[in-house]
Amino acid sequence: MLTPVPGGPQVITFPFRGAAQAIANADLGAVQSGLAAYVGVPRAMAQLAAIPAYSLRPDARLLQRVADLMEQFNMTTEVFNVSSIIRG
């Protein structure tokens, strides 16, 4: 079960993402407890939340789409090549 740490970080840092994802995949109750404890969502509402799955590896194609849309809608003035920042 997830329990809040007083004064602890509210974001899971990179080294722990894999472990957090494994817990989330195996134990929905742990995710719901975390939502209630860290986000302040009432327990009854947390139990109704749909929990998305996120890839632990970046998808250059999807990220490039976001960068292209940002350029298209004038959110940035630069053309950005996402593959230049993704290792793999």
Image (tube, grey):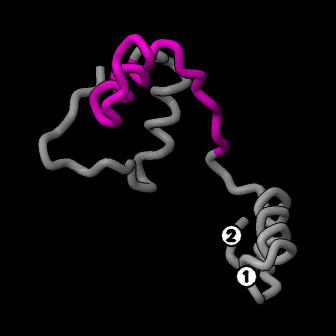
Return the mark for residue 36. Answer: none
For badge 1, the amino acid type reads Thr
| Callouts 1 and 2 close, C-beta under 8 Å | no
Please tell me which of labels 1 and 2 falls first in the chain: 1
Query: On the rendered structure, is 87 left or right of 80?
Result: left
Q: In the rendering, at what x and y percent does residue 56 appear? A: 62, 47
Residue under pointer 1:
76
What are the residue bounds of the magenta stretch? 30-55
Q: In the rendering, at what x and y percent does residue 74 appear? A: 79, 79
Is residue 35 positioned above or below 79 on the image?
Answer: above
Nearer to the camera, 2 or 50:
50
Residue drawn at x 72%, y 76% is 75
Q: In the rendering, at what x and y percent does residue 35 appear? A: 38, 28
Nearer to the camera, 28 or 42:
42
Query: Quarter holding the N terminus?
Result: top left
Is residue 25 positioned above or below 74 on the image?
Answer: above
For badge 2, the amino acid type reads Arg
Q: Nearer the viewer, mark 1 or mark 2?
A: 1
Residue under pointer 2:
87
Q: Is residue 65 magenta?
A: no
